[in-house]
Image (cartoon, helix red, strand yellow):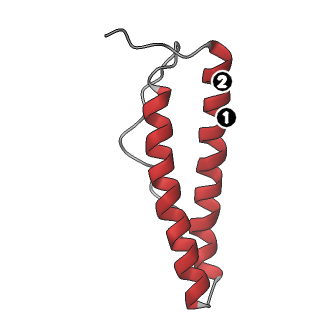
Amino acid sequence: MDIQKLADHESLDLHEVINFKTLCLAKSKLMQGLVFDHDLRALMQKDVEQSIQALRELQALYQRAPFEAPVPQNRPTPIIN
């Protein structure tokens, strides 16, 4: 079966969505350290987990882009200090 490639504009839009979702994920993850309410922190953790799942699905779609770039398996070490 022939796998359809995304059009150039679709690939660019998808790339922008992935970047935006990644930034939202990072913000949610970082803001958890500032939240002291347990219910809000649990809600933010759920958002992080759902965002990670959404990013996995978007990355699977990104493989159909005509100018596919490999997705690195390792992530940079966060700066905590």
Amino acid type for the residue under numbered disc 2? Leu
Q: How far apart are labels 2 and 1 at the CA level?
A: 6 Å
Amino acid type for the residue under numbered disc 1? Glu
Residue 26 image-quadrant placement: bottom right
| Residue 12 % position (x, y) | 66, 24
Residue 73 image-quadrant placement: top left
Residue at the (57%, 81%) spot, across then down: 41
Labels 2 and 1 touching (C-beta < 8 A)? yes
- Looking at the picture, tell me which residue is in the foreground, 47 or 71: 47
Q: Residue furthest top?
A: 2
Residue at the (60%, 22%) spot, across then down: 11
Quadrant of the frame with the C terminus: bottom right
Residue at the (67%, 28%) spot, across then down: 13
Image vertical order of residue 13 relative to residue 51, above or below: above
Name the mark on residue 12. 2
Helix or strand or loop: what does disc 2 sit on? helix
Name the mark on residue 16. 1
Q: Residue furthest front?
A: 1
Residue at the (45%, 41%) spot, across then down: 57
Q: Residue furthest left?
A: 1
| Residue 49 % position (x, y) | 46, 62
| Residue 29 % position (x, y) | 56, 67
Graded by Cα atoms within 10 Å as few (under 14), some (14 to 19) or many (20 or more), the crowding at tag 1 reads: few
